[in-house]
Structures are given as C-alpha cells and as structure tokens.
Image (cartoon, grey):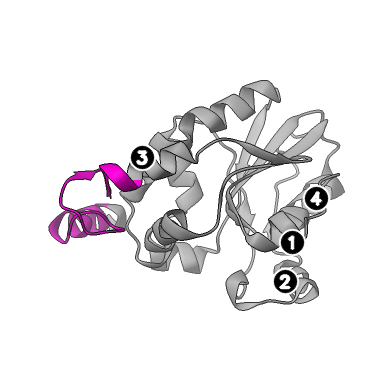
C-alpha cells in the first residue's frame, strides 16, 4: 500500500528531470543527464569490490532523492543504467546467491522500501533477504572509520537454515565508503557458513574508498 501511495505521489509531483528540471525526461532524467550517467557506467574494480560510479554529481543526487525523498520510481532509472553490468558481474563470477544489504524495519517503514531490493526486482535478479537487527545511525553522519565499524556491529541476522555453504555470494549496496557494512555482513556469514567466495558490488564508491582504499575480503 505504501509503495502505491509513493508511486502516485511521484506521478502527481513529477516536475521534469530530477537533476536539471528539464521537462523532456527519460524516466526521471532528461536525455542529457541520462547520457552522462550512461557514458560513465562502466564497471570498476578494486579486488573483490565492484562499483559503477563515484559518489558525486548526478548519481549522488539521484541516490539521495531515491532514499531520502522516497522516490521509488527512481528504481527504474537505476535498473536501466546498471542492470546489464550487474548481471555480467553475477555471471562472470558464477554467483549463486545475491544478498542486498538490509535496512532496519523501522527505516524501511519510514521510507516504504529497501532501495537495493527494489533495483534487484526491476532487474529481475533473485535475491536472499536477511534481517537487520537494529536501526543504526546513518553512516554518512559518522566520519571515523572505527566508529563506523562499531555502529554497524552485530546488526545482521542470518537464519542457520539458509544454504550458503559452498556458495559464491554477491553482497549488494548503493554506497561504499570504508567498507564497514560489507565487512560486518561478511563476518556474519562466515561465522555460520563456509562460502566458496564472497564478492561485493556497490552502485557508487565514495572518494574515501577510491583513494584510500578499503579492505574487504582481499580488496585493497
């Protein structure tokens, strides 16, 4: 019901390109903004971490509108922009299980959806849903790397009946900075299971993660 209300709201208050307000839109973007993102949408890799864009400019605005303004129809833009790349990563790494980073039930209720799950649905990619045990502080409000790790610690729950032993797993999120969220979920999985490999995909990577580097499962 909430997703329906959000969709109606987005339709009623649609005001052109979400970035530049141009009325000639392709989804939520005008042709110019769409082409800019599409041109930049190549797969980048740092070890076991894949990402598409730097977290800046047009894509930063798009993600903020998606998450903070609950504009659920933006999932279509992201699915169109990254669907092929994401499926290529899944196929080339022989991924058996895709796990989107979960958000707390309270935050999901406030927003109306988990943005990563919505994108995966639009891309027709099956995924395994796990639980977020607590509502943590927004990671963007925490600058210290150790405090980020403390904030996300013990946040996830995975049912022991889930079949993750011997699997190639892809963990998916929208922004990576220090890698604390990825690392915490990786640790949670490896405490209970023995996966074959764990790979990470983020739609965007912050300047911190690109220039300082993050250490996730062999990523530097």
User: How far separated are the C-alphas under marks 1 and 4?
Assistant: 9 Å
Q: What's drawn in magenta, residue-wise? A: 4-33
Please report contact status of discs 1 and 3: CB closer than 8 Å, yes or no: no
Give the camera-side residue of 99 and 89: 89
Q: Name the residue under label 3.
A: 35
User: Could you say which disc has been placed on residue 180 in the image?
Assistant: 1
Please indicate whether residue 58 sits to the left or right of residue 157 in the image: left
23 falls in the magenta region: yes
Q: Distance between the residues labelled 1 and 3?
A: 32 Å
- Residue at mark 4: 216
From where the camera sits, is residue 163 visible?
no
Q: Do the residues labelled 1 and 4 touch (CB within 8 Å)?
A: no
Q: Position of residue 51 (x, y in %)?
A: 62, 44
List x then y, in percent, for residue 16: 19, 55
Dot 3: element: helix
Q: Earlier in the sequence, mark 1 or mark 3?
A: 3
Of labels 2 and 1, earlier in sequence is: 2
Rendered view: 180 above or below 88: below
Instruction: Name the side, left or right, on which 102 lies relative to 213.
Output: left
- Identify residue for label 2: 148
Mark 1 vs mark 3: give the one in front.
Answer: 3
The reply to whether discs 2 and 1 touch (Cβ–Cβ < 8 Å) is yes
Secondary element under disc 2, as helix, strand or loop, is: helix
């Amino acid at each position: 019901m909430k997703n329906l209300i959000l969709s109606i709201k987005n339709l009623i208050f649609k005001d052109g390109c979400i970035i530049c307000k141009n009325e000639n839109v392709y989804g939520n973007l005008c042709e110019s903004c769409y082409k800019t993102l599409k041109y930049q949408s190549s797969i980048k890799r740092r070890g076991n971490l894949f990402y598409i864009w730097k977290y800046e400019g047009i894509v930063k605005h798009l993600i903020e509108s998606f998450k903070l303004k609950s504009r659920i129809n933006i999932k279509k833009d992201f699915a169109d922009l990254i669907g092929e790349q994401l499926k290529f990563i899944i196929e080339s790494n022989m991924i058996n299980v895709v796990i989107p980073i979960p958000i707390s039930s309270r935050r999901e209720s406030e927003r109306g959806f988990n943005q990563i799950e919505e994108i995966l649905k639009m891309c027709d990619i099956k995924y395994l849903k796990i639980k977020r045990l607590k509502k943590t502080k927004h990671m963007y409000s925490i600058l210290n790397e150790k405090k980020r790790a403390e904030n996300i610690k013990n946040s996830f729950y995975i049912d022991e009946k889930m079949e993750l032993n011997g699997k190639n797993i892809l963990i998916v999120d929208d922004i990576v900075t220090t890698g604390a969220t990825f690392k915490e979920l990786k640790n949670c999985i490896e405490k209970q299971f023995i996966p074959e490999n764990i790979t990470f995909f983020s739609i965007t990577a912050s300047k911190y993660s690109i220039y300082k580097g993050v250490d996730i499962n062999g990523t530097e």
